[in-house]
Image: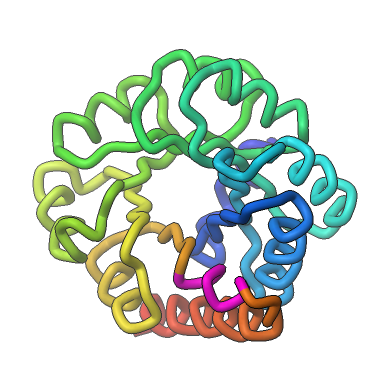
Amino acid sequence: MEKFRSLNTILETGIISVIRADNVERAVELAKAVAEGGIKAIEVAFTVPQAHQALEKLSNIFAGSGLLLGAGTVLDAETARIAILSGAEFIVCPHTNVEVIKVCNRYQKVVLPGAMTVTEVVNAMEAGGDMIKLFPSSVFGPKVISAIRGPLPHAPLVPTGGITLDNVKEWIKAGAVAVGVGGELTKVGQNGDYKKVTETAWAFVTKIKEAREN
């Protein structure tokens, strides 16, 4: 049941916040600011130094809150297991790694393998991916969603890369089940302006809701 709740949490607000920072403390503060803005799925990238420590701290901070914590830029099964043991409820990869998917399914955690072409998307779904991270989506733009969903209308695509407040509605209307947003959220907080991060997060949540309603 936990896995189904995790999937529903991602689908509910339709956005995964990707946290990238140069240290654990900044990653934690960015995650807290994003959560205050209404985003319920937060992905700590494993490019963050000692990312597992950030996951552990955030797991304690958000325990019982309903917020879903995950790990991103996971390249291998070993990293996936470390992330899961540190509190991650979902795993995101920039590519499709069958061993990572096996680990996630073994522990009943949501996994989003990365893909870009129709062949890669099919391979990721056949390997057991719950949702497919479409990456780097900035290369093609929102039209790639409808193009892929032509032959694969059932593909649960989560574009990541190049998603902005100006185009997020286009991605949702094109058929994305959710979007992954990193720099557009976190860059505004690099100087410590976490209030701006919260405001930007809320703007994304609002625009996604409006796109779905229309």
100 lies above or below 214: above
Quadrant, the N terminus:
top right
135 lies above or below 21: above
Q: Nearer the viewer, residue 49 or 90?
A: 49
Using the rendered view, name the quadrant where residue 52 is placed: top right
30 lies above or below 126: below
Q: Is residue 139 left or right of residue 9?
A: left
Give how far across and how far down residue 43 sits, in percent. Answer: 59, 50
Quadrant, the C terminus:
bottom left
| Residue 156 located within the stretch drawn in magenta | no
41 lies above or below 194: above
Judging from the image, the colouring scheme is rainbow
Q: Nearer the viewer, residue 214 or 92?
A: 92
Q: Residue at x 55, y 36 (%)?
A: 91
Q: Is residue 29 left or right of residue 116?
A: right
Q: Residue at x 52, y 71 (%)?
A: 187
Give how far across and how far down residue 145 sits, in percent. Answer: 20, 57
Give how far across and how far down residue 118 sits, in percent. Answer: 14, 37
Q: Nearer the viewer, residue 37 or 151?
A: 37
What secondary structure do most residues of the magenta stretch adopt?
Answer: helix
Using the rendered view, name the quadrant where residue 114 is placed: top left
Give how far across and how far down residue 163 sits, in percent. Answer: 35, 68
Q: Is residue 164 left or right of residue 83?
A: left
* Magenta span of residues: 184-190
**How many circles with numbers are drawn on the protein?**
0
Q: Residue at x 65, y 62 (%)?
A: 40
Q: Residue at x 34, y 58 (%)?
A: 161
